Image (cartoon, coloured by chain):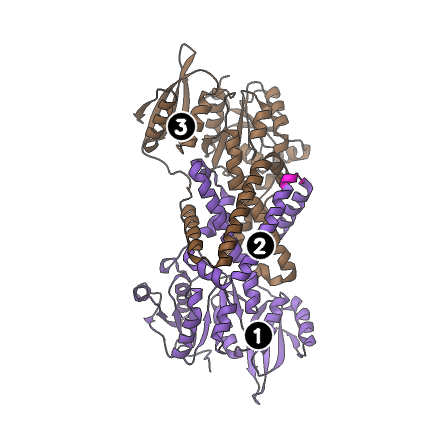
Chain colours: A brown, B purple
Amino acid sequence: MTFPSSSSEPRRGTVVGLGLIGASVSLALRERGWHVTGVDADGARADDALAAGAVDGIGFDPDAELVVIAVPVSSISSAARAALDACPRAVVTDVGSVKGPVVARVDDGRFVGGHPMAGSEQEGLGGADAALFSGATWVLTPTERTDAAAHAAVRQAVISLGADVIELAPERHDELVALVSHVPHLAAATLMGIAAASAEEHATLLRLAAGGFRDMTRIAAGHPGIWPDICAENGDAIVAGLTSFVAALTDIRDLVSAGDRSELLVRLERARAARVNLPARLAAVEDLVEMRIPVPDRPGVLAEVTTLASDLDVNIIDLEIAHSAEGDRGVLVIVVDSQAADLLRSALLARGYRPSVAALE
Amino acid sequence: MTFPSSSSEPRRGTVVGLGLIGASVSLALRERGWHVTGVDADGARADDALAAGAVDGIGFDPDAELVVIAVPVSSISSAARAALDACPRAVVTDVGSVKGPVVARVDDGRFVGGHPMAGSEQEGLGGADAALFSGATWVLTPTERTDAAAHAAVRQAVISLGADVIELAPERHDELVALVSHVPHLAAATLMGIAAASAEEHATLLRLAAGGFRDMTRIAAGHPGIWPDICAENGDAIVAGLTSFVAALTDIRDLVSAGDRSELLVRLERARAARVNLPARLAAVEDLVEMRIPVPDRPGVLAEVTTLASDLDVNIIDLEIAHSAEGDRGVLVIVVDSQAADLLRSALLARGYRPSVAALE
């Protein structure tokens, strides 16, 4: 595989599934000069996307270097296998909300699981937006089976769309996303459902719904069709998350019931501190260092290093793989915040790597 | 009591409690030409408010026609009684999140309970904003003890700040607000608490927190200090609301666990429809009618008519009380949407009123 980094020819890609996310990816790539074809099980939707200028053509591009699968979670693995066959030079990634079962089913070095943490209460082609991923966190879930060059290529493409990449093991992704996305979505829908049921009796109720309630239930306005799939594919983590949430709410209810003011205040202060400290988009870091890590040229190394960085909350701002002339070893070059470099360096040393650190020119 | 509706002298008011809401009320009244003094248990805060131009002076104004109490819920009734004594010509209202216990404790014809459904994750004087109430719903909770002229005066002042007024019985307010404000707040804090606890183990978790999670937990960033009071004063309704929420979440968890895709979809579709239909601010209504309702000049009539309108989801856009020359009867003149007029007229007829309806000039 070669991925031309500069050429007079446009880079070529295919997006499979032309809903909100797929069409947004296509628009964003095209804005950056790519030639992008679109594939959709619904031929009329593909035609609409072409007519709307979201894609340059219809069908798999056999010369594509990148295919992005943006279909419902239950269809990702078959769509990914079809793309791997149709586009023999391409790296293939997806944007599904559940990663473990998908990554296990595809099992090909050219496939890298992905999940942009971005969305919209819009849906379909009409809601597509080339800027949707700007500033978003985009998870990649490489495994020891993932080809390092494929991983690097997907990483570079995603970053070019303005997203911040973090790497996680697929199962860890699913567990964490259950807590920050799936359980909150179900909670919002449940809260809205209770309010709507009470509003049947007291019509004024919904007129009392001020900003806080509106904020909390906004995601319940999103497209419901994707959720049965997500709940099926990530059921264990979602059930565990809902169980924790129910237990914690029951606990709060008991504090209210018992009139335990001081413990209530402790809980609310803690939640407030956490919310106030919720990281915004990573600021442009001026104080960066380059870390060069000699690595054996075998699958899994890149996944190990990048997920290790994520586990340590070290943000990899840039990543490049320099292969040695001999071919059996290479150098992984990453750029990280200088404050985080020592932490990552120690962890890498403990795993037998020999990283060197230098200030960025 | 007389409330001059036009005069070369500025109208005079006092705000008690100069936090975010109190200072915002004062700024909004001053923007509309009022002279407003401020009272705060914390003398330094009152000085700050004066220095910042949020109030015209410090202390109760004995000539005030309106006093707004904006202190923590547990202190409202004593502050209201102090205001009723200090300002003998004033109508007194409050902005607390719980109404039943407060209204029961104050029990004076010149006091009208109130609650603007507006807030901010800001706090204190620095977050004050004269536009905070523009487009907000502002609940008033008159009872049969409330003086009709006092109610009308508070209503007119609140509407002048840009808010939409609805009248509710104090207990009904508390029950509904538990569902759309208190339970959501506790749920947001609980969700944030679970995520923060998990983030201690997996530092990356909070970097995955995208728009939906941020929206849902935003209110958890609000000032926690007010919540022990609210939970104490509205404990029964909050416990009932949390119990419903826990039961509904448990139900959803069981659907996920059982893989019941179709029922999950039904619930999410229903929630979505309700969220999409959440009323925005009432549009400017061009098609209005004036309803004239002869009423006995006794306490409670205005409360009965206005809470009846709210129960029927009829918005009272304007309200005036015309006293008859004889003094024992008056005419209540209200302006409502013409589409809602028939509904309200029938309900009033059923209660023995004799309303007449005419198109607005």
Q: Nearer the viewer, residue A30 or A290?
A: A290
Residues flagged by tags 2 and 1 on a common chain:
yes
Question: In the displayed structure, would residue B52 be above or below residue A283?
Answer: below
By secondary structure, the bulk of the magenta-drawn segment is best described as: helix
Q: Chain of mark 2?
A: B
Are the residues under badges 2 and 3 in a single subunit? no
Secondary structure type for disc 2: helix
Disc with the residue nearer the chain's start (2 vs 1): 2
Label drawn at residue A318: 3
- Residue at (50%, 50%) from the top-left corner? B188
Q: CA distance from mark 2 to mark 3?
A: 49 Å
Q: Are marks 1 and 3 on the same chain?
A: no
Q: Nearer the viewer, residue B83 or B346?
A: B83
Measure the alpha-carbon separation of dots 2 and 1.
31 Å
Question: Can residue A315 be seen in the rendering of this structure?
Answer: yes
| Residue B258 highlighted magenta (yes or no) | yes
Residue with the mark numbered 2 = B243
Residue under label 1, please give it: B303
* Residue kind at label 2, given as amino acid type: Thr
Q: Chain of mark 3?
A: A
Quadrant of the image for the C terminus of chain A?
A: top left
Q: Secondary structure at mark 3?
A: strand
Q: Could you say where residue B324 lies in the image, as x and y percent from the top left? A: 57, 86
Mark 1, secondary structure of its residue: helix
Q: Amino acid at mark 1?
A: Ala
**Up/down of B244 relative to A49, above or below:** below
For mark 1, name the chain: B
| Left or right of A276, for residue B107 | right
| Label 1: how many Cα within 10 Å (few below 14, some 14–19, many 20+) | many
| Residues in magenta, as a range | B256-260
Q: CA distance from mark 1 to mark 3?
A: 66 Å
Q: Residue at x 43, y 27 (%)?
A: A306
